């Protein structure tokens, strides 16, 4: 017992002071992509052609970047000859609507809180059931880590539960393989109404690296009504946490 | 020696496909049999078919760990079936089922002939279970082995599991609390990864391999890049090999730390569970220090790596490694000194050394039975050719052994990292990637944190992938988990499962 107590003292207090204090992220963290179109050479399509999931489209109207398809990899930044596209350190990426994830020069419309009735129901106690629908285990791992002491999801009243019957909503990861389709839908049906669906990661939003494979359904948006989209591959735990807290109205910015 | 019928191949070195001997079935079979009787392992057995033709080629890659040699051979199957090797050579059991499912040729008298991933055959009109064309297999619907008796009950778990974890189905035959038999049926995660690689490489290929088992990004990406580099004659600078080696060990550290924490959690020992849950993040953040992503995405690239560490960052990494290791040591040593933990770990979920050898089990699960097999030692590639990490083994084959091997590996990986982080060789971090040569074969082996990762690539006349075979270590090990549950309490299932911690998506592809 003494050894355990001494170990406890040594391990110290580790919970981050977020949201009171902004989190520290690695220097090379790839957050929100930023495009400076003034630097783009005429008729250059290097980034669009390099992108593995065709998240970037260049039309006469301009460049569009679909955060829901984005893997946050370095293919576009490597391909760009002028440094016009780069990643910022902004970890706040969650949105309420699928269309809000398509960036075209205007600022990202971050997720607004649920309407008042849902906020009253879920704001102080949100129980979530996670379903991995062919996820690769990275999104799952960084969802799991939210319950550990550094992030301590429990202090916000959010908890992952063992049964959909105990849950207020689903957190879906993975591109939704055909082999998980009916299990995902059955789990959704087992959640009592009113319920939420949160899609975490590029796979759950659009299919990610598996988009277009006949074995998958390109994410859950075509199968379930999604209330919150959290982009990333995988999204950093802070991105997920920010998204969840925004949904509950616990984090708000005056502008953007 | 009859294994001379196969041709010798070194891991990570390409060979013209014409040099792979095409043998008659009897000699192919005999070679595999005598090699496995001599203690060698089948690292890959797979089919390749020109889909318009009526025949299928089978390729076998055998590993002689003692002499760091691989041997490869091929045979042609013209009929819709072939005699199963499994009764005499159990370690190919799942490979044969996979061949049947993918190409519709049946291994006759296979003792456990069931689907693997529950997908339609790649050859229309050839279905190993005689299902009608267009009739999609229903996942999880198969003949489960059943024990009959009045007091027997059957427990079914999954696909959706209670925690935040990938899906799979577990069917227990129980007598009260005691498990007589556990059957594991997977395929829920099947995304078609292997099939989409044919015709590549293309801009999606590396991203598919980074996510084929998303917690083993560095392991699979390294194997893929080694295959591509061998096929194209691309040279990797030494500084890049050091960075790849560091990333691979950091991946091992993060996952082993997480596993020890999870094992502690499964026996209700919350101090270690809580601390390790956090410290795992410290190791992930070290990977993010190098490449911006906690899982190492976008780090390993054909020709080398895409991120470097300057002296200041290298020193920072070194300092943070020391802190994280001190924390892990502090947290994990509580486990070995807590009799309540030891009472739950020791003698539980044992797999015998003989069964591990028979099944071709790899990784910490095999080393926990005293089997000294580790691709870093047996088939060293990259920096492992210059810097050896001692192989960690224990003998009891139980949950304790699998946990303790992880602890030994953590210590040894930290020692390796300390050495490497002292200073890097000068030079670039990426060689120029060349085009793939036509009509070649290569086998890449990397010791991922779960065990040996094997990628086999064959190129066609245009230098594109004709076939890309991925073998995740979990493919070898799931059966061992089934065996580990025999005569155990069903309440120990989460503990046993966690002591293996296998990949569902790495198996399902």
Image (tube, rainbow, N blue to C red):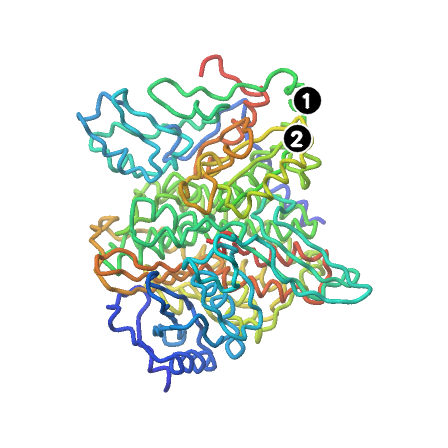
Q: Is residue B207 visible?
A: yes
Label 1, residues with CA under 10 Å away: few <14, some 14-19, many ≥20: few
Please say if B41 is above or below B203.
Answer: below
Distance between mark 2 and mark 1 Cα atoms: 9 Å
Q: Residue at x 50, y 29 (%)?
A: A229
Count of labels in the image: 2
Pick the residue in front: A7 or B350: B350
Q: Residue at x 30, y 42 (%)?
A: B310
Q: Which residue is mark 1?
A: A121
Disc number at residue A168? 2
Pick the residue in front: B361 or B170: B170
* Position of residue B438 in the picture relative to residue B22 (left or right): left
Q: Position of residue A254 (x, y in %)?
A: 48, 12
Q: Position of residue A153 (x, y in %)?
A: 60, 32
Please report contact status of discs 2 and 1: CB closer than 8 Å, yes or no: yes
* Position of residue B172 in the picture relative to residue B324 (left or right): right
Q: Residue at x 25, y 27 (%)?
A: A84
Helix, strand or loop at mark 1: helix
Q: Position of residue B425 (x, y in %)?
A: 26, 53
Using the rendered view, name the quadrant where residue A214 is placed. Answer: top left
| Residue furthest top in the image | A254
First in sequence: mark 2 or mark 1?
1
Label 2, residues with CA under 10 Å away: few <14, some 14-19, many ≥20: many
Q: Is residue B308 visible?
A: no
Question: The residue marked by circle 1 belongs to what chain?
Answer: A
Pick the residue in front: A5 or B167: B167
């Amino acid at each position: 017992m003494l050894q355990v107590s001494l170990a406890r003292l040594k391990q110290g207090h580790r919970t981050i002071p977020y949201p009171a204090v902004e989190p520290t992220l690695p220097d090379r963290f790839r957050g929100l992509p930023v495009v400076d179109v003034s630097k783009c050479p005429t008729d250059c399509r290097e980034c669009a052609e390099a992108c593995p999931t065709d998240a970037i489209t260049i039309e006469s109207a301009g460049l569009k970047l679909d955060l829901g398809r984005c893997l946050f990899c370095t293919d576009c930044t490597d391909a760009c000859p002028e440094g016009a596209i780069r990643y910022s350190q902004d970890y706040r990426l969650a949105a309420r609507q699928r269309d809000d994830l398509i960036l075209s020069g205007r600022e990202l419309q971050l997720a607004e809180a649920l309407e008042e009735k849902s906020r009253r129901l879920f704001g102080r106690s949100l129980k979530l059931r996670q379903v991995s629908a062919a996820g690769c285990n990275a999104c799952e791992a960084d969802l799991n880590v939210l319950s550990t002491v550094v992030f301590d999801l429990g202090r916000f009243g959010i908890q992952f539960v063992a049964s959909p019957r105990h849950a207020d909503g689903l957190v879906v990861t993975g591109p939704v393989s055909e082999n998980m389709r009916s299990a995902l839908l059955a789990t959704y049906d087992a959640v009592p109404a009113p319920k939420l669906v949160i899609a975490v990661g590029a796979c759950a939003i659009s299919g990610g690296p598996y988009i277009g494979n006949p074995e998958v359904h390109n994410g859950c948006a075509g199968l379930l009504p999604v209330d919150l989209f959290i982009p990333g591959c995988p999204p950093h735990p802070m991105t997920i946490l920010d998204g969840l807290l925004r949904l509950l109205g616990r984090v708000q910015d005056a502008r953007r | 020696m009859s294994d001379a019928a196969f041709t010798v191949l070194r891991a990570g070195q390409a060979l013209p496909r014409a040099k792979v001997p095409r043998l008659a079935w009897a000699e192919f079979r005999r070679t595999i049999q005598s090699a496995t009787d001599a203690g060698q392992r089948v690292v890959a057995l797979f089919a390749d078919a020109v889909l318009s033709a009526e025949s299928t080629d089978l390729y076998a890659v055998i590993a002689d760990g003692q002499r760091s040699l691989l041997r490869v051979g091929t045979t042609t199957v013209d009929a819709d079936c072939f005699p199963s090797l499994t009764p005499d050579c159990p370690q190919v059991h799942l490979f044969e089922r996979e061949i049947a499912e993918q190409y519709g040729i049946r291994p006759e008298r296979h003792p456990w002939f069931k689907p693997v991933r529950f997908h339609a055959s790649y050859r229309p009109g050839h279905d190993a279970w005689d299902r009608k064309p267009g009739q999609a297999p229903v996942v999880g619907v198969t003949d489960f082995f059943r024990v009959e008796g009045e007091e027997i009950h059957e427990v079914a778990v999954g696909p959706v599991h209670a925690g935040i974890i990938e899906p799979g189905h577990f069917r227990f035959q129980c007598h009260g609390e005691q498990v007589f038999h556990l059957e594991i049926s997977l395929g829920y995660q099947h995304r078609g990864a292997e099939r989409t690689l044919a015709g590549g490489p293309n801009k999606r290929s590396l991203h598919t391999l980074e996510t084929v088992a998303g917690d083993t990004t560095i392991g699979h990406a390294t194997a893929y890049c080694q295959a591509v580099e061998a096929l194209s004659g691309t040279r990797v600078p030494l500084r890049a090999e050091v960075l790849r080696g560091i990333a691979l060990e950091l991946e091992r550290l993060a996952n082993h730390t997480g596993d020890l924490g999870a094992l502690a959690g499964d026996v209700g020992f919350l101090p270690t569970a809580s601390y390790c849950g956090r410290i795992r993040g410290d190791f992930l953040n070290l990977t993010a220090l190098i490449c911006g992503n906690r899982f190492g995405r976008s780090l390993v690239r054909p020709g080398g790596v895409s991120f470097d560490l300057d002296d200041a960052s290298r020193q920072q990494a070194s300092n943070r490694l020391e802190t994280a290791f001190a924390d892990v040591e502090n947290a994990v040593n509580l486990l070995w000194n807590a009799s309540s933990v030891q009472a739950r770990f020791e003698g539980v979920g044992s797999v015998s050394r003989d069964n591990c050898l028979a099944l071709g089990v790899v990784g910490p699960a095999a080393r926990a039975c005293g089997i000294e097999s580790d691709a870093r030692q047996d088939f060293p590639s990259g920096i492992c050719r210059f810097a050896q990490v001692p192989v960690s083994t224990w003998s009891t084959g139980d949950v304790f052994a699998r946990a303790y091997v992880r602890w030994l590996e953590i210590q040894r990986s930290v020692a390796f990292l300390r050495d490497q982080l002292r200073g890097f060789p000068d030079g670039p971090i990426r060689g120029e990637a060349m085009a793939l040569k036509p009509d070649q074969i290569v086998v890449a082996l990397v010791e991922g944190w779960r065990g040996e990762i094997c990628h086999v690539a064959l190129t066609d006349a245009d230098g594109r992938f004709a076939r890309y075979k991925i073998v995740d270590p979990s493919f070898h090990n799931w059966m061992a988990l089934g065996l580990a549950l025999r005569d155990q309490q069903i309440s120990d299932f989460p503990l046993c499962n966690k002591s293996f911690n296998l990949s569902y998506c790495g198996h399902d592809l």
